[in-house]
Amino acid sequence: MNVQHFLNTVDAISTWVGKAAAWLIIGLMALVCVEVFKRYILNMPTAWIFDASNMFYGTLFMLAGAYALAQNAHVRGDFLYSSMQPRPQATLDLLLYVLFFLPGIAALVYAGYDYAALSWRIGEHSTVTAEGPPIYHFKAVIPLAGALVMLQGVAEIVRCIVCLRTGRWPSRSKDVAEIDVVEQQLARSEYVDEEARKIAIERAQRIDEEARQRGMGGDPNP
């Protein structure tokens, strides 16, 4: 299998799962709205609403992890990283993936599997309320989400190796483009002087170009 095809396939899997999980926010919103109506209008609160909302949000949060990694959207302290050339970036990333990411996610999958298996064996229910809802299906999401993050992490390691060999980051499937809304609004404003408008337009264009180059795997600062 071609390396780029492998990367695109893994990115596509992570993106599909992340987008599918995003629909849970609709269910969570409906759940909370119904409960607010029942609690404050009908004076009929639901005992298991806390558990259900936790399961909805927790599932969304965990299944979105691989998607965020595929989009390079996790928080990064990049005040030094962003000024590096691609090869030093790849070296640092590879080191951190091997030392911290792989052991941590492997432990999550291993412990999460045991945790979920025990929950399924005993038919575990929540103990927050007297008749809490079943939670074994929710705990099964833990090793599943860990496996998806691990798969995406392997793809990121492959990206690092390719970058070390070629000096360029391989292309990444981009779901959204990074834009600076403030700069673009300022560029269209009628209430700034011409010099400020010109600077804002140039900065907005430069940000858009850098976003396009990152999406194509290019380096905006060769």
Image (cartoon, rainbow, N blue to C red):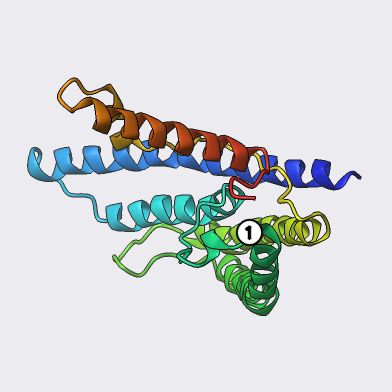
Q: Is 210 left or right of 164, judged from the image as shown?
A: left
Question: In percent of the image, x 39 and y 52: which residue is there?
Answer: 57
Q: Is 92 left or right of 137, judged from the image as shown?
A: right
Question: In percent of the image, x 37 and y 36: which residue is there?
Answer: 26
Q: Name which quarter of the figure residue 197 lies in.
A: top left
- Element assignment for label 1: helix
Furthest-front residue in this view: 195
- Where is 103 relative to 144, above or below? below
Along the line of sight, the residue nearer the viewer: 165 or 27:
165
- Where is 188 relative to 167, above or below? above
**Total of numbered circles in the picture?**
1
Q: Position of residue 176 (x, y in %)?
A: 51, 35
- Where is 45 relative to 27, above or below? below
Question: In percent of the image, x 67 and y 79: which residue is there?
Answer: 99
Q: Name which quarter of the figure residue 213 lies in.
A: top right
Q: Position of residue 172 (x, y in %)?
A: 67, 43
Along the line of sight, the residue nearer the viewer: 21 or 213:
213
Amino acid carrying label 1: it is Val
Q: Is 70 left or right of 200, judged from the image as shown?
A: right
Q: Quadrant of the N terminus?
A: top right
Q: Position of residue 126 (x, y in %)?
A: 39, 65
Q: Is 171 left or right of 59, judged from the image as shown?
A: right
On the image, numbered disc 1 is attached to which residue? 149
Q: Position of residue 160 (x, y in %)?
A: 73, 61
Q: Around disc 1, counting alpha carbons within 10 Å, would you say few (fewer than 14), some (14 to 19), or many (20 or more)?
A: many
